[in-house]
Amino acid sequence: MDSLMEAEEKLRGFRETIGSQKLYACFECGHCSACCPVKRIRQEYSPRKIIHMVLLDMLDELISSNIVWYCTNCYLCQELCPQGIRIADLILELKNLSFKRGLSPDGIRRQFELLKTQGRIYLLDEFDQKKRKKAGLPQLGGSIDDLRVLLEG
Amino acid sequence: MADEIRIGVFICDCGSNIRGVIDVPELVEFSKTLPYVVVSDEGKWTCSVDYLSRMKDLIKEHSLNRVVVAACTPRTHEPLFKRTVKEAGLNPYLLEFVSIREQASWVHMKQKEEATKKAKDLIKMAVSKAALLEEGEEIRLPVGKESVVIGGGISGIYSALSLANQGFQVTLIEREKELGGILKRLKSVKVDSKELDPKEVLQAKLNEIESNSNIKVLTGYEIKEVDGYIGNFRVKVENGSGSEEIKASTIVVATGMTERKPQRGQFLYGEDRKVLTQLELEQALKENSDGFLNDVKRVVIINCINSRNEEYGCCNMGCQISLKNAAMLKEMIPDSEIFVLYRDLTLPGSEGKIIYRLREKGIKFIRFPDDRYPIVRNDNGTLKIEVFDRIISEALNIDADLLVLTCGFKGADGIDELKGMLKVSSNSEGFLQEAHVKLGPVDFPSDGIYLCGCSRSPKGIKESVDEAMAAAMRASIPMNQGYIEAEGIIAKIDLERCNSCGLCWKRCPFSAIKVDEEKRPHVIEALCKGCGLCAADCPKRCITIVHFREDQIIAQIEAALEEEPQKKIIGFVCHWCALGGVDMAGVSRLQYPPNARLIRVMCSARVSISMIEKAFELGAAGVLVAGCEFPTCHYISGNYAAEKRVNRAKKILKKKGYDPERLWLLWCSAADGPKFADTMQRMVKELGLN
Amino acid sequence: MAGEILIIGGGIAGISAALNAADYGKKVYLIDDTPSIGGIMARLDKTFPTNDCSICIEAPKMYEVENHPLIEIMTNTELKRIRKKGKGFQVVLQKRARFIDEERCTGCGKCVEACPVLVDDELDGKIGGKRKLIYMPFPQAVPNVVVLDPDCRYGKRRQDGACVGGCVVDCSQCRECPIALCVKACLEEGKDAVRLWQSNKNIRLEVDSVIISSGLSPSEPPKGLFGYGIYQNVITNMHFERLMNAGGPTGGIIKRPSDGAHPKRVAWIQCANRGLKEGLLPYCSKVCCMISNKQTIISKEHDPEMETTIFNMDLTAYGKGFYDFYRKAVSMGVRYIKAKPFAVSEIPESKNLILSYEDPEQGRVVDKEVDLLVLATGLIPSDRNQKLSKVLGIGLNELGFFKEKDSLDAPLESEVEGIYLCGGALGPIDISESVVQATAAALKAVIYSDKDRGSA
């Protein structure tokens, strides 16, 4: 559990990051929520709510829940925001923070591991190889070494 | 009316606009047959320079002493003909103007015979009124160069300086010991996105006042009595030791406003030391800036306390005050957490950017629903605030070391008494009622008294200063001229028949009737606007209106209904909106049946029950009373009075055996030609006249 | 009393300033660059919060100005040059040709009847408003004189069927026109007021002080915003106001553009073009909340069955009586929803619109169908400001409005001594505040004009 001071430090750093996203200019019009395709399916997901919670310093709550991971990066909110707030970029930052603190969902973690070991986020298995052989396509290889270097660096 | 009456009738062709439909030569011949008509003339364009010259010649040649003009509309052209008639040596109130274009040729284009008949009637009506016209004159009331400003806050100060700098003598009266009003209690004040020290702002102005020999300052004085009218006010003031009577020509009211404190217990106000209003916060910071904020780490501000509900409107300043103070607190305690709990945040212009900057500094904004205010509890000495966050849709709990409540404002203490003394009114929040919120914002209905600043409605320092100068301008006009002038259309009271019932002076919207020691009413002619409300209400029928006397109007009714009354509707239309609507119908060439014979009055309030009765007595098919829509009456409350009277008239008509459904009331705006035309159609249909 | 004041802009601010200054005893020149005084207020239907008919309360003031012995109105006139002369100013005004002799024209309208060409009206074009090439600016215009469209006079409307233009000889040399139908109609009336060869006139004046009351403009949203300019049934506040006005293009009956039908479901979107992004307005125009509120009330008064919805963010009700006005709307059934629809799509057959928004109460996205969509767009500086600012040598602020020298020490003063500012020229404002500022500016102008006196 961070002390108040440490939390403030982290916050300050994050604030600079989100400052560049112009978050403080949000006038809570709800445009972002209204256009979000995820919201149509998952009622509880609301970009407007996410921004509001960040402004209230409710970061812990946000990044320890799965909510930020619903974002599909379609960027519609960012395109349509009348104040030019980089909403999708913000959510990406939140995802990064969540990942760094080890709070991201399992599925994401596994994807990351796969990327590290195999250079891809979906597992290659026999099913795919068989289909390729049937279609006359060459078999796909193992991992990509360069990527591993990048990721470990 | 000792001299022989000699009337000249001048009828306009208006090119083909009138002549194309109406047989104007027939009108000319017809006019000659009317009583007292000595000459009747036709002009292609009677408003043209050459015709006006001819008119003047004819007036002189035939020694005319009354003039009737039958042309377009008096709303636009009466002033022109009045000037012309005056130039010919005649009193301009001896002119009667009838509209045979807007009321006949333009609206009955397919019924030429009927249009001509109507025009004949209108001219007949005008001639019979003209025979009874008397001279009128503009009345002047002298106005001196002294002014009293009540209230020494920023508005009163600016007003006083604006007046004094023109050379007027100003007495600035303030009941506190020092000038300055609310400014004295503020820690900071924001103007043009800059934060200023109220003390400096005030001091600069106080220096100006001191060095201005035209301003006399009376601090510590209360107003005890106000009497009189423009040019002749007497203001009695008292302080602890004595009293003074100040004579003035004009009064500017700048009494400001007070903070509406919450009730005891509301949000723990008055029960917990940590709960303050915004003004109390500023005062505390002024007096004890260091000690007061020790141990304060968390501040919660709640806006719209007791505002924006059934009782009170938006205080206008709450958002700006709360944000200014939030910023101030954050600066004083950089590591504090500050929450602003609000319903709406309204910042006009570019002021909205303040919120962005405050957010950047870490101030938190939480919006709560209009009908679900935060709940404040004291739990073991800690203030606990529960607020329902609209966006998260959850109740959040905040512990606070300081709770600041942004309450609204109301009129100054004692405003009820003062307004009684000044004979002005206020709304339920204690803010004084101006003549017209849009076009007469710093005037009162009565001449000579003006208002400005927060006494009218809560506002910031910049708006107050603008209003203060505007009020000073309004007061300067009559004082600079040395008089005010009323048009000759005024009320005259015949005291022989008066029984001092008091109706007239109580009901006059302009306070233009005063009573003497024996309770007898006297019209202060220069203040009278001629609406006729008093005349129509007077139970003894002893009040008359110049140029709109009862006998003149009855003469018009008689002339209109002389022939075929059963086909005719007598319509009383007010000069301002109703006639405007009639004119609009004309301009738009809306066609409607020709049954109406319209009689112009200045205000629908002029129409008395006896006039309505007369029309029915003489056999009219119906009567229409048309005035301005609510609330647009030119004479403030005339249309309300007319409505009441028409309702009474219906009852009386019923008793006398007439059908009350034949009396109609119409509220018509000057742009609503279609409404008037439509009313004519419906009336004719429902009265069975088609 | 000596002293003359020039007032630039004949809207309600200019009119108020003129009446105050003239009643004070000064000679006033009131100029306006349109053919009539009256400004925006003359074209509105009602004013909030009293719901007074706008022109009903303004027209008597306009007539007062016209009849005032100390006020001279010059319409179609703009400021060309101004130079300081002693404590006062030397100005050159240009009165653009109206092509009508103002002394002769009586506003009878025969020329308008005779004109064969209808074109889109500048104000009402988008909602079907048309005017002739020779026209009365509006029925209550002051001066009540028609004006000829310069495009017609200079032959640019031939393809629309205009009679004039393209002659062998130029009008200014011809001096009598056998072709123009308006000329013929006027001659038949015996007035002969159409003057095709009229040229622009330069007028030189010396004045003591100047008041700028040049006003502002309603803004047009960028094309595509909420479907504006793409779907027919998306209009602005100003258009709706004109539809409500009995003097407007539909005689006061609310008809939607696509089929002229009376809409039963209307929605307003507040702060429609507000934002920090390019092409949007980065500030609050403060009156739009009340404008829309007023429009819903008037609509409901005409048709209680109409479903009216206002989508807003914050409710700005700063003035006297404004919050009560809001409550009145709510009590009449007007629905306020705190959300901004993100998308508007059109149903091809009915041309109805579907708005998608996040319902704040339910938390889900709702699609709502309406017959007509009204965008409450903010107020922007008049397009005259740039030019006027250069001619006067007075700066504009970053939003493009004129700037006061200092709100407390020099209220309503510009950087140039003797030139004062009021009303919409300074920023978004309502009628009440315009009148206050105009009255105050008039005081400053008359005091400056009385050179031996102090300052206001």
Image (cartoon, coloured by chain):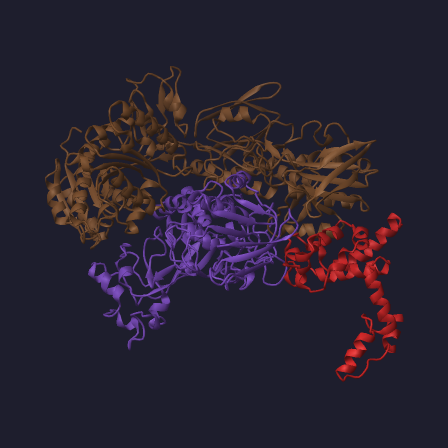
Chain colours: A red, B brown, C purple
Residue C418 visible somewhere in the drawing: no
Estimate the x, y position of residue C241 in percent, counting from the top left: 45, 51
Quadrant of the snapshot with the C terminus of chain B: top left
Estimate the x, y position of residue B139 in percent, counting from the top left: 33, 32
Say which of B643 and C365 sits in front.
Answer: C365
Say which of B495 and B397 sits in front.
Answer: B397
Estimate the x, y position of residue B107 in percent, counting from the top left: 25, 48
Quadrant of the snapshot with the N terminus of chain B: top left
Residue C362 to residue B644: above or below: below
Residue A101 lies left or right of residue B36; in this view the side is: right
Residue C368 visible somewhere in the drawing: yes
Say which of C281 and B674 sits in front.
Answer: B674
Residue at the far top: name it.
B518
Looking at the image, which residue is at 37% across and 60% down?
Answer: C130
Dividing the picture into quadrants, the one containing residue B343 is top right
Residue B423 to residue C289: above or below: above
Dividing the picture into quadrants, the one containing residue B641 is top left
Estimate the x, y position of residue C299 in percent, counting from the top left: 45, 46
Residue B98 to residue C208: above or below: above
Q: How many marks?
A: 0
